[in-house]
Amino acid sequence: MNSSCLLPLEQASQDALAAVRIVLADIDDTLTTDGHLTARAYDALERLAVEGFAVVPVTGRPAGWCDLIARFWPVAGVVGENGALAFSYDRVARRMTRLFAKSDAERTADRARLAKLGEDILATVPGSALAADQPYRIADLAIDYCEDVPALSADAVARIVARFERAGATAKVSSIHVNGWFGNYDKLTMATRLLHEVLQINLAAEGEHALYVGDSPNDMPFFAALPLTVGVANIATFAATMTALPSFITKASGGEGFAELADRLVDARTSALAPTGEGMG
């Protein structure tokens, strides 16, 4: 698809933005910029939480990271490993709720199969490597193609995907990794479950109150499912290979683009709640 069909965020309806209560956001290259969570991006998370938005990062990053994010970030929950799990921390009760797409036994069996598959991929796609965060994963295999290794070609990335699929695994390309797992779950299915079981939000019935922001092909289930979606500017890198694109695009890339979106959401809510002046004299 052509990124030129993406509308600038400035054209988003003020009423549609004011209706948003749930902000679902990818992390890498959406909340982060060049691998860093900047002060401005983190402040945007904090402002959204203070203003009453339920913010839920939705990421391919590992379970170990998600435990920290759920505990320490100003978020309502986090979906990790591309939908394999979701964590939500109740700070009052000091209790972590953990949801998984598969049982312990299934995950153990899958990890053995994925370990062999990883060896095959590294042997057949020169320059690829296991992601540095692989030791903290419980359900998927992450192959690094540009985070800590020299960037591989599009053909090499396609060969990694093909190896996953040949083994019967699902494969998704993020901005830094190719993630593979056994199962039909994805970010959207687990996010829907987290919202329903933990936050008592029915995403199917309340879709107009949710917004998703992302930057890469593994965000497409959300872009196809929700009426209001946003891509940060760097999504243009992948747009030609994507079959579902967001409704709008920010001016800025990465965390700056997320902060730009947060500004619009807070401004829209503030304007909607402001008194009209009727009856005042």
Image (cartoon, grey):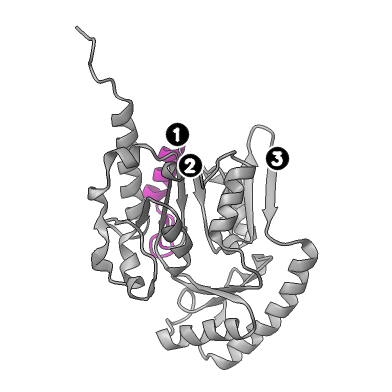
Sequence-wise first label, 2 or 3 = 3
The percent coordinates of residue 56 (x first, y second) are 51, 48
User: Could you say which is closer to the camera, residue 117 or residue 240?
Assistant: 240
Badge 3 element:
strand
Q: Name the residue under label 2.
A: 206
The percent coordinates of residue 41 (x first, y second) are 39, 50
Q: Quadrant of residue 208?
A: top left
Task: Say which amino acid is labelled 1.
Answer: Val
Task: Say which amino acid is labelled 2.
Answer: Glu
Q: Decide: marks 3, 1 in contact (CB < 8 A)? A: no
Say above or below: 143 vs 47.
below
Separation of disc 3 and disc 1 at Cα? 21 Å
Indicate yes or no whether the magenta region holds residue 38: yes
Front disc: 2 or 3: 2
The structure residue drawn at horizontal position 42% and vertical position 81%, both measured from the top left corner, is: 151
Q: Is residue 280 left or right of residue 130?
A: left
* Region of the chain picked out in magenta, as a range: 29-49
The percent coordinates of residue 71 (x first, y second) are 61, 45
The percent coordinates of residue 254 (x first, y second) are 36, 59
Task: Say which amino acid is labelled 3.
Answer: Arg
Sequence-wise first label, 2 or 1 = 1
| Residue closest to the far front | 205
Badge 2 element:
loop
Badge 1 element:
helix
**Which label belongs to residue 95?**
3
Front disc: 2 or 1: 2
User: Could you say which is closer to the camera, residue 222 or residue 63?
Assistant: 222
| Residue closest to the far right | 105
Q: Decide: marks 2, 3 in contact (CB < 8 A)? A: no
Q: Name the residue under label 1.
A: 50
